[in-house]
Image (cartoon, rainbow, N blue to C red):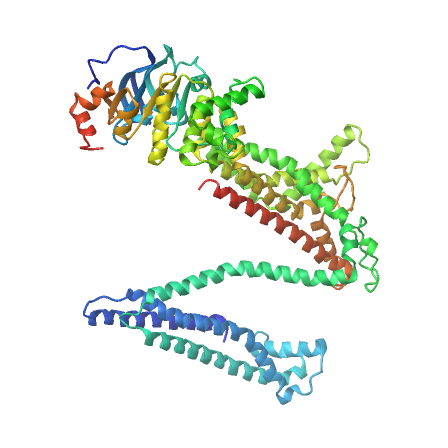
């Protein structure tokens, strides 16, 4: 079975391009032959029921699956035409270019400032304290957190509220100036107001970074994304413009899922 | 009648009570209209059995400590005892001999005076033995009857049994605490006696240690009871040299085991490391005294340091450090493993390498647990005795030279208690004061360590 690609999906510049990607956990196949282009200037949403492999696929895109010993990736994923699984590629460089935000906010048990400064420090981005301060301020501003925390940059990052923690994690990812930001259900641990703020933030960041968001919420996908891919049982069933997927799904399973018949 | 037999008797009665009560509960169940009881029949059985056995056991415990005294009282009041010597060894020896014969553990009496006591003894033993059996039976019966009469269809036997079991669990946990309290009290008692003879200030801050167990106990020379060199030796060996060895090695092995080792290597290395904790300290002592200490002396001599002692603080400290490694590494291992995977992922996803993640995220996050482990290790090291007895020497030196012989608090406690002085001599009593100080220090270290661990746990919930 091949993924159904909507006919009126125009060609765009692909930032990342996955071709025939399959992922195995030991003998178990988690992703079956997925091919997708991630456009530079849009937000792409991965939707689908639990266990459909959308998070697994997301994690292959910055090789976070490397941390799971039994995981094995077949196929080919490129970033600007460069194979990210090639032995020549430095995974450290890759992850600096492809940042990630997790399901549960995971700020380090350090000060807010140090949380943001972490990436720039390990990648040697900032030259001196002034530049680091500027990066911290810029990142927090982009994440819409600056006004809330500017007077307490030395407080612990874990002392913030859940929504603030998640925006801190987004600011932390932005601080190393990535090209792609992967978000793995970034709002699933947050209340509606914090979720609205994150969605607003995704809108603001859209265009500056290629963003891929995995979400359980179809409304969220409809609100924040311009491209949507529907995953089911490890396969990518349908891919197209978000409006097309939600108003005119071509596959029965997609139709069933978005109308709430299962999932 | 020996306590063991009485105990068997009580347990037998308990079994009977268990069966009877269970049968009764089954009968309730058959008669009851609903066929339901407030508790399962087994719980009725246990309720009665516990009410039979526990009071009986309490009685047996009291009786077995009381009856020998009662037996002796009764023998002493017999006419044959009137011509016993008033006090002293002879009187005790006669009584002991008569008792042994009466109990049948000695064949015959050698001393004529004891001969007359055998029969009163025999009478008393059988009389009080019978009393013990009767007492056990009565108590068991009363407990059984009282509890059996309470059985009803709606009797909540299970909650009662659970309450009794919970109480016995509480008592079991109290044993350790009460023992600690008992230790403190006995130490305090002797320490106060010692401080009545030697000024605490002289003891804690004096710099010369050399108690003379043969001196006049009435008038001790306080200048010979300065324990500062001992405290210094203890800290230098246990908290400085040993920790210089144990902290880096323990931490590094914990980091390797949690972050780098593959599961097969880990499954071999971790138990192997833990075996270190199971080696008897006296074996470490041999190793320190026979292998490490001469080796260190030879090296010192080879590089031109004269006067290196064959017993040195360095040898004892190094070996003690090796002994402590598993304590540091297993606490560090646990606390690093307890840092949520999300932290690790977060750092790796930022493009940090594994080593950057360890240095900047995992170790700082696990630091409270690591510090607590180190403190427990220090308290273990300063209380360690065998290694220092065998390798550190006996000279109370206040010196920073690790090649010199030094002595520790624990070593001096051993020396003073096994010395020739009488028990109430200040030199012997000083062992208790030393033990008290050591106990307080390790208690404080453990207390602080537990507090630190507690705070650390709260951080990730």
The image shows residue A47 at horizontal and vertical percentages of 27, 26
Residue furthest out toward the bottom = B79
Q: Quadrant of residue A8?
A: top left
Residue furthest out toward the front = A147
Q: Quadrant of residue B144?
A: bottom left
Q: Is residue B449 above or below residue B63?
A: above
Look at the image and tell me whether residue B425 can be seen.
Answer: yes
Q: Residue at x 36, y 71 (%)?
A: B48
The tally of labels here is 0
Q: Which residue is drawn at 81% across and 49% down?
A: B208
Image-based side of B113 in relation to B144, left or right: right
Q: Which residue is drawn at 48% across and 74% down?
A: B59
**Foreground residue among B457 and A25:** B457
The image shows residue B286 at horizontal and vertical percentages of 66, 43
The image shows residue B305 at horizontal and vertical percentages of 80, 31
Look at the image and tell me whether residue A119 can be seen.
Answer: no
Say which quadrant the C terminus of chain B sits in.
top left
**Foreground residue among A100 and B144:** A100
Q: Is residue A163 above or below residue A238?
A: below
The image shows residue B449 at horizontal and vertical percentages of 57, 45
Image-based side of A156 in relation to A57, left or right: right
**Foreground residue among A164 and B229:** A164
Q: Is residue B212 above or below residue A146?
A: below
């Amino acid at each position: 079975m091949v993924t159904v690609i909507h006919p009126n999906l125009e060609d765009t510049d692909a930032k990342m391009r996955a071709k025939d990607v399959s992922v195995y956990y030991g003998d178990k196949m988690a992703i079956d032959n997925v091919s997708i282009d991630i456009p530079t200037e849009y937000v792409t949403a991965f939707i689908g029921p639990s266990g459909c492999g959308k998070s697994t696929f997301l994690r292959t895109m910055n090789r976070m699956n490397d941390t799971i010993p039994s995981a094995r990736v077949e196929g080919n994923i490129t970033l600007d035409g460069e194979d990210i699984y090639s032995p020549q590629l430095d995974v450290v460089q890759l992850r600096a270019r492809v940042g990630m935000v997790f399901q549960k906010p995971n700020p380090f048990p350090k000060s807010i400032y140090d949380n943001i400064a972490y990436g720039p420090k390990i990648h040697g981005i900032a030259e001196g304290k002034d530049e680091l301060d500027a990066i911290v301020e810029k990142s927090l501003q982009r994440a819409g957190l600056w006004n809330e925390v500017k007077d307490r940059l030395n407080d612990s990052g874990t002392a913030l509220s859940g929504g603030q923690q998640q925006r801190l994690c987004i600011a932390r990812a932005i601080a190393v100036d990535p090209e792609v930001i992967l978000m793995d259900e970034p709002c699933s641990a947050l209340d509606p107001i914090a979720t609205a703020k994150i969605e607003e933030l995704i809108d603001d960041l859209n265009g500056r970074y290629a963003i891929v968001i995995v979400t359980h919420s179809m409304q969220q996908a409809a609100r924040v994304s311009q491209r949507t891919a529907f995953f089911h049982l490890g396969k990518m069933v349908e891919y197209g413009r978000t409006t097309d997927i939600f108003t005119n799904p071509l596959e029965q399973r997609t139709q069933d899922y978005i109308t709430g018949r299962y999932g | 009648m020996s306590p063991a037999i009485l105990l068997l008797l009580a347990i037998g009665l308990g079994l009977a009570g268990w069966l009877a009560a269970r049968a009764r509960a089954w009968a309730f169940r058959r008669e009851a209209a609903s066929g339901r009881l407030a508790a399962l029949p087994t719980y009725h059985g246990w309720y009665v059995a516990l009410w039979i056995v526990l009071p009986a056991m309490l009685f047996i415990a009291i009786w077995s400590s009381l009856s020998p005294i009662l037996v002796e009282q009764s023998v002493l009041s017999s006419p044959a005892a009137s011509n016993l010597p008033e006090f002293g060894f002879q009187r005790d020896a006669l009584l002991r001999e008569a008792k042994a014969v009466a109990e049948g553990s000695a064949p015959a009496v050698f001393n004529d005076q004891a001969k007359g006591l055998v029969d009163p003894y025999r009478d008393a033993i059988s009389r009080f033995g019978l009393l013990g059996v009767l007492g056990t039976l009565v108590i068991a019966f009363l407990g059984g009857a009282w509890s059996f009469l309470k059985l009803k269809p709606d009797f909540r036997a299970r909650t009662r049994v659970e309450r009794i079991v919970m109480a016995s669990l509480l008592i079991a946990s109290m044993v350790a605490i009460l023992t600690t309290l008992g230790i403190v009290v006995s130490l305090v008692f002797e320490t106060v006696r010692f401080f009545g003879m030697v000024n605490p200030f002289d003891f804690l801050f004096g710099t010369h240690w050399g108690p003379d167990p043969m001196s006049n106990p009435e008038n001790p020379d306080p200048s010979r009871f300065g324990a500062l060199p001992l405290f210094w030796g203890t800290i230098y060996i246990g908290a400085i040299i040993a920790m210089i060895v144990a902290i880096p090695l323990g931490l590094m092995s914990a980091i390797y085991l949690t972050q780098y080792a593959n599961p097969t290597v880990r499954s071999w290395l971790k138990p192997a490391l833990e075996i270190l904790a199971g080696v008897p300290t006296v074996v470490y002592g041999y190793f320190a005294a026979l292998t490490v200490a001469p080796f260190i002396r030879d090296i010192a001599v080879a590089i031109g340091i004269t006067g290196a002692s064959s017993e040195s603080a360095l040898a004892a400290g190094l070996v003690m450090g090796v002994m402590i490694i598993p304590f540091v590494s297993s606490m560090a291992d646990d606390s690093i493993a307890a840092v949520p995977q999300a932290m690790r992922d977060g750092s790796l996803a930022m493009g940090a390498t594994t080593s950057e993640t360890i240095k900047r995220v995992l170790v700082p996050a696990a630091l409270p647990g690591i510090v607590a482990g180190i403190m427990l290790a220090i308290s273990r090291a300063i209380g360690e005795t065998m290694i220092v007895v065998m390798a550190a020497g006996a000279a109370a030196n206040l010196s920073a030279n690790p090649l010199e012989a030094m002595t520790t608090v624990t070593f001096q406690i051993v020396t003073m208690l096994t010395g020739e002085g009488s028990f109430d001599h200040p030199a012997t009593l000083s062992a208790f004061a030393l033990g008290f100080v050591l106990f307080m220090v390790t208690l404080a270290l453990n207390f602080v360590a537990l507090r630190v661990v507690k705070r650390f746990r709260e951080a990730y919930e």
